[in-house]
């Protein structure tokens, strides 16, 4: 009689095992979420004052940084310039940011030449409104082509003196 009470068919055993697996899975998820839940630590009054003073200090430093950056900005003095020959000081006086001036100088150092004002507009980082502001002031001198002058390298070499013997008295 007790054998009949604890005997299950194959399909009943599968269902029981499935239900046990689901129960263990849910229990494991609950345990993990409880473990990962952040612990709330009550803030004391002294810690609150420290936090407030830290935040006030950060705000003060931000105000100082903003005032320094506004002082370092150069007011734009628009004047005619040739982007092929302008130096960094002149480009900064035109109101161009440092990174754009650097891009222009790198472009010229690699052999780049501005042939028209439109070619100046293709500098990496140059905004369209800045280009439109500078466009009337861009003057590009005609490019002088350097013709290859052939030189006779044979005549430029110093002749070697052979069999040179100083005269002895």
Image: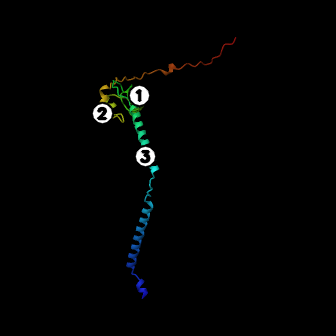
Q: Give residue 131's position: percent from left, percent from top.
A: 31, 31
Residue 34 on image: x %, y %? 43, 63
- Few, some or many residues within 10 Å of mark 2 (<14, 14–19, 20+): few
Find disc 1 in the rendering and name its residue.
88
Q: Name the one closer to the observer, 133 or 36.
A: 36
Give the camera-side residue of 93 and 142: 93
67 vs 76, nearest the viewer: 67
Question: In the image, 27: left or right of 139?
Answer: right
Q: CA distance from mark 1 to mark 2?
A: 20 Å
Residue appearing at x 49%, y 21% in the figure: 153
Q: Is residue 27 visible?
A: yes
Closest to the camera, between mark 3 and mark 1, is 3
Q: Residue furthest front?
A: 45
Q: Secondary structure at mark 2?
A: helix
Task: Determine which residue is flagged by label 3.
Answer: 52
Q: Residue at x 42, y 36 (%)?
A: 64
Residue 81: quarter of image: top left
**Horizontal and vertical percent for residue 56?**
42, 42
Determine crowd level at label 3: few under 14, some 14-19, many 20+ residues with C-alpha closer than 10 A: few
Q: Residue 61: percent from the left, percent from the top? A: 43, 39
Pointer 2: what residue? 129
Q: How is the image coloured?
A: rainbow
Q: Earlier in the sequence, mark 2 or mark 3?
A: 3
Asked if residue 86 is positioned above or below residue 26 in the image, the reply reads above
Whether residue 47 is situated above or below residue 87 in the rendered picture: below
């Amino acid at each position: 009689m007790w054998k009949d009470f604890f005997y299950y068919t194959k399909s009943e055993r599968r269902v029981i095992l499935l239900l046990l697996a689901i129960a263990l899975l849910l229990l494991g998820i609950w345990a993990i979420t409880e473990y990962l839940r952040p612990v709330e630590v009550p803030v004391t009054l002294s810690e609150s004052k420290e936090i407030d003073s830290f935040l006030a200090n950060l705000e003060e430093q931000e105000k100082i940084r903003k005032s320094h950056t506004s002082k370092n900005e150069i007011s734009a003095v628009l004047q005619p310039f040739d982007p092929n020959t302008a130096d960094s000081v002149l480009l900064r006086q035109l109101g161009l940011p440092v990174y754009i001036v650097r891009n222009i100088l790198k472009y010229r150092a690699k052999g780049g030449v501005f042939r028209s004002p439109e070619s100046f507009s293709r500098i990496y980082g140059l905004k369209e409104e800045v280009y439109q502001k500078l466009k009337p002031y861009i003057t590009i001198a005609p490019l002088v082509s350097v013709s290859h002058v052939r030189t006779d390298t044979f005549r430029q070499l110093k002749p070697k003196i052979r069999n040179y013997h100083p005269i002895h008295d």
